[in-house]
């Protein structure tokens, strides 16, 4: 049998045996300074990895802040988050992004995306060529994931969690970008929700026509 034929048959089998590489992008994830922050996202990811077939890494951006002094409260806690850590065998990186008071609602998806894109590109250079992006929270995280996925040419999924389904669709600016950022039917991934009621709200939020605002 020609060697080319053997190689041709072996390649699909090798691809099938390769772990799916998943990049999780979320601001809701535990860290050394806030071990209870977003534990439900970590629990779901750990369960997915435990089933086998998936290699995952996490980008959990945090707001940049200069001081760790306790008088600054939550902001100081963000400053104490390490740039990277290993949690239950999963590598986590915490790139910093600029959070702007008052205008943060409009700017945050783009500032998140800029920080995440730099970190994701660095991981690719280091050899972690992820196959898809898994985001949590439709806005701003889902919009940021959509921007990064478009730039890097990979599919993405986004899970609605609650406030992003109940509150943000009533706000013109988030609704506009949530509508733009929904995964397409041609995409590998679709939007997920954590309950039947959430799925209904996800559908309404993502199909509302964008408006100016």
Image (tube, rainbow, N blue to C red):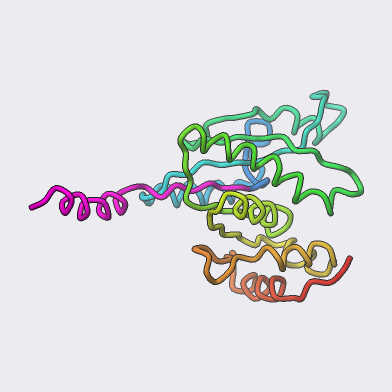
Dividing the picture into quadrants, the one containing residue 136 is bottom right
- Front position in the image: 135 or 199: 135
Where does the image place residue 26, in percent across and percent down from the top left?
64, 48
Could you tell me residue 134's position as x and y percent? 56, 53
Residue 127 in the magenta stretch? The answer is no
Residue sitting at 81 percent across and 30 percent down? 65
Position of 19 compared to 204: left or right?
A: left
Where is residue 196? Give x, y as percent: 59, 73
Magenta stretch in the rendered image:
1-25
> Vertical placement of 134 versus 170: above or below?
above
Question: Measuring 38% from the left and 51% from the top, which residue is drawn there?
Answer: 51
Q: What's the magenta bit mostly, secondary-structure-wise? A: helix
Which of these two is toward me, 182 or 164? Answer: 182
Residue 73 placement: quadrant: top right
Outermost residue, left side: 1
Which residue is painted at 68% across and 45% down in the image?
27
Residue 11 in the magenta stretch? The answer is yes
Tell me where residue 45 appears, x and y as whole percent: 50, 49
Q: Quadrant of the C terminus?
A: bottom right
Look at 41% across and 49% down and name the residue there: 54
């Amino acid at each position: 049998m020609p060697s080319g034929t053997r190689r041709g048959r072996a390649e699909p089998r090798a691809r099938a045996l390769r772990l799916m590489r998943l990049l999780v992008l979320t601001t809701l994830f535990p860290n050394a300074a806030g071990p209870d922050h977003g534990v439900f996202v970590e629990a779901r990811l750990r369960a997915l990895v435990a089933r086998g077939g998936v290699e995952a890494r996490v980008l959990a951006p945090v707001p940049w802040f200069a001081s760790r002094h306790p008088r600054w409260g939550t902001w100081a806690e963000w400053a104490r988050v390490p740039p990277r850590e290993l949690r239950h065998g999963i590598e986590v990186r915490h790139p910093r992004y600029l959070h702007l008071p008052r205008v943060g609602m409009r700017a945050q998806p783009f500032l998140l995306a800029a920080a995440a894109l730099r970190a994701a590109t660095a991981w690719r250079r280091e050899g972690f060529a992820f196959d898809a992006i898994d985001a949590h929270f439709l806005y701003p995280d889902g919009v940021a994931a959509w921007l990064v996925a478009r730039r890097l040419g990979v599919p993405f999924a986004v899970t609605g969690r609650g406030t992003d389904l109940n509150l943000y669709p009533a706000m013109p600016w988030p609704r506009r970008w949530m509508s733009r950022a929904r995964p397409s039917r041609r995409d590998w991934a679709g939007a997920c929700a954590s309950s039947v009621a959430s799925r209904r709200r996800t559908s309404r939020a993502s199909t509302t026509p964008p408006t100016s605002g």
